[in-house]
Amino acid sequence: MAETGIAKLFWNGRSQAVRLPREFRFQGDRVRVRRVGNAVVLEPMERDVRDLDAWFAALDAFAHVPFMEDGREQPPMQERPELDDLFE
């Protein structure tokens, strides 16, 4: 089971902020933020953002996850006249 804790929320100007407990602190001054369902995930950002090989290698960890496995629901194509027919 993942380590858990409780963090304090507060306002800094017009932005909401989180005060992380010591055991969850990050190095540096920025983190990547993403939403997964109703969770918000904070991930450390590497200092050298030019290291694309490492970034793509990290993405490969998700290669087994199907993209849009159930397909997508889309309305049927509209019937439209050909452009040539409009200018006759």
Image (cartoon, rainbow, N blue to C red):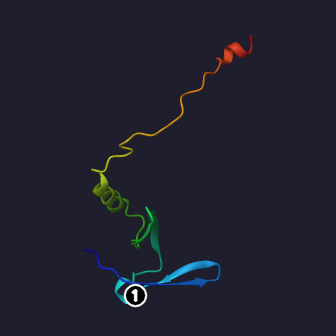
The image quadrant of residue 27 is bottom left
* Residue closest to the far top: 88
- Which residue is label 1 attached to? 21
Q: x, y (%) of residue 6?
A: 40, 84
Instruction: Find numbered disc 1 in the image and state the secondary structure of the residue it sits on.
Output: loop
In which quarter of the view is residue 72 placed?
Answer: top left
Vertical comparison of 60 with 14: above or below? above
Question: As shown in the figure, which amino acid type bears the numbered disc 1?
Answer: Pro
Q: Dividing the image into 4 quarters, which one contains the N terminus?
A: bottom left
Can you name the residue that lies furthest to the right here? 87
Count the labels in the image. Answer: 1
Say which quadrant the C terminus sits in.
top right
**Residue 66, horizontal then vertical, whole percent:** 32, 46
Q: Position of residue 12 (x, y in %)?
A: 60, 84
Residue extending farthest to the left is 1
Residue 8 image point, x, y percent: 48, 86
Q: Is residue 62 above or below residue 47?
A: above
Foreground pick, 29 / 65: 65
Which residue lies at the image location 32% right of the left edge and 62% below the top edge?
Answer: 54
Residue 77 drawn above or below residue 31? above
Answer with left or right where residue 72 lies relative to residue 83: left
Does 82 appear above or below 21? Answer: above
Which residue is found at the position 60% from the left and 77% from the top?
A: 15
Q: Residues within 10 Å of mark 1 (few under 14, many from 20)?
A: few
Residue at the spot x=38%, y=89% of the render? 22
